[in-house]
Each structure stands twice: as C-alpha cells, then as structure tokens.
Image (spheres, grey):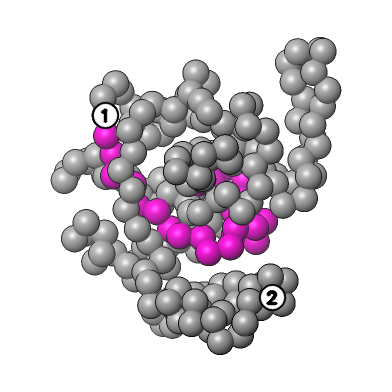
Amino acid sequence: MLKLRYWLGRINEAVDVYRDVVVRKGMAPVEAQKRLMEQLSTPLSFSLPMTGTAMSPTLNNGVGNKETLWIRRILQASERNVFLNDVVVLIDPHDERRKYVRRVTAMPGEELVSDRPEDEPIVLPPNHCWVSCDNEKGKPDSRFFGPLNFDKVIGRVIYAMRSATDHSRIVNSQKAMELDDIILAVEQPLLQSA
C-alpha cells in the first residue's frame, strides 16, 4: 500500500508539471512527455553535502562540521508542496551556481514588519516566500535577496547524516513530514547506500 501511495503521489506531481510546461510554457507535448518519463524514472530524493553554520543549530552545529543531507526533490515548488517552517534547498537568486539550505519563515500574502521604524512593512507577493537562516548571524537569506520566488526552491531537507552512527530526521511542517514519510520509507535503501 505504501508503494502505491508513493507512485500515485509521484504521478500526480509529474502530471502537474507536464500540464504546466505544455499549457503555460508552450512546450511540445512529445518533448514534455519525454521529460515526464525522465522525472518518473529518477528517484525523488538525492544527497547533498552541506558545510557552513548558517543553519546551526539545526544543521552543522559547530565549526568545521560537514553533514550529508538527504533532499526530497520538488519538481515544481508552490504553496501546495512547500510549507511554513520547512527546511528547503534553494538556488541563489543572484548566482545560479550556488545552493543554500534555509527555513521558510513566511508565505505569500503574509506581512513582515521590521524592528527598525524607518523600514516599510513588506507583504509577500503571490508565489513567493521568505527564507531565513536558523543562525541569526548566517547569510545570505531573504534579508539580503528579498522575497524568494518558489521557482528557486528545488527540494526539502528530510534527513541529515553527520556520521555512520549520528543521523536524524529533519523536523519540517507536519504536512511536509507526512508527504516525505512515504518517500523516505520507499527510498530508504538508497539512503543507506549513500
């Protein structure tokens, strides 16, 4: 039953992406179908090494620490699959070569008010979120590059491995944890071989 739920979720997500690239972006149906099949044949999770302390104490708690993160790929990020308090992987809006791990701290339509009276409140536009480092001294995050378009979110961190004996599940929103439980359970053998 678990594998059935896994594949139904994957197919549903892939069809949403297919519909988007054919209808909104005008991709030829044959090319979109080819990309759909590629997506379905690729696992939804991948590993990513992480250095730095921007997400300390959640991740890399200590100088020089390096963790391997297990990421749940998000094919097309939106409010339907990225939630408040999720720890996400994003592409730097100013440098496509860089990836960061940050926490989603506000969602579209939310108003953000600064501690400084001279700053105007910000209302997050549609299809944007606000991401922050867990370590207040960490950077860059939305304090530096502003609201983040969901297009820049490529995954959600679901597991961290510090060593062969020190590893743990990353706590995200309840909805994300429920969705990712299925992926983690089905793709667990990949995690163990990484």
Whether residue 106 appears in magenta in the rendering, the answer is no
Q: Position of residue 38 (x, y in %)?
A: 43, 77
Q: Position of residue 180 (x, y in %)?
A: 45, 61
Residue 108 visible in the picture: yes
Crowding around mark 2 (Cα neighbors within 10 Å: few <14, some 14 to 19, many 20+) is: few
Residue stretch in magenta: 66-88
Pick the residue in front: 85 or 153.
153
Q: Residue beneath label 2, please?
A: 26
107, above or below 31, in the image: above
Q: Quadrant of residue 160?
A: top left
Which kind of residue does numbered mark 1 sit on? Asn
Label ID, residue 65: 1
Q: Residue at x 48, y 54 (%)?
A: 155
Disc 1 and disc 2: Cα gap in Å?
45 Å
- The quadrant of the rendering that contains the C terminus is bottom left
Task: Tell me the SS state at disc 2.
Answer: loop
Q: Residue at x 24, y 66 (%)?
A: 189
Whether residue 70 appears in magenta in the rendering, the answer is yes
Q: Residue at x 54, y 81 (%)?
A: 31
Which kind of residue does numbered mark 2 sit on? Gly
Q: Which tag is nearer the camera, tag 1 or tag 2? A: 2
Q: Position of residue 137 (x, y in %)?
A: 49, 18
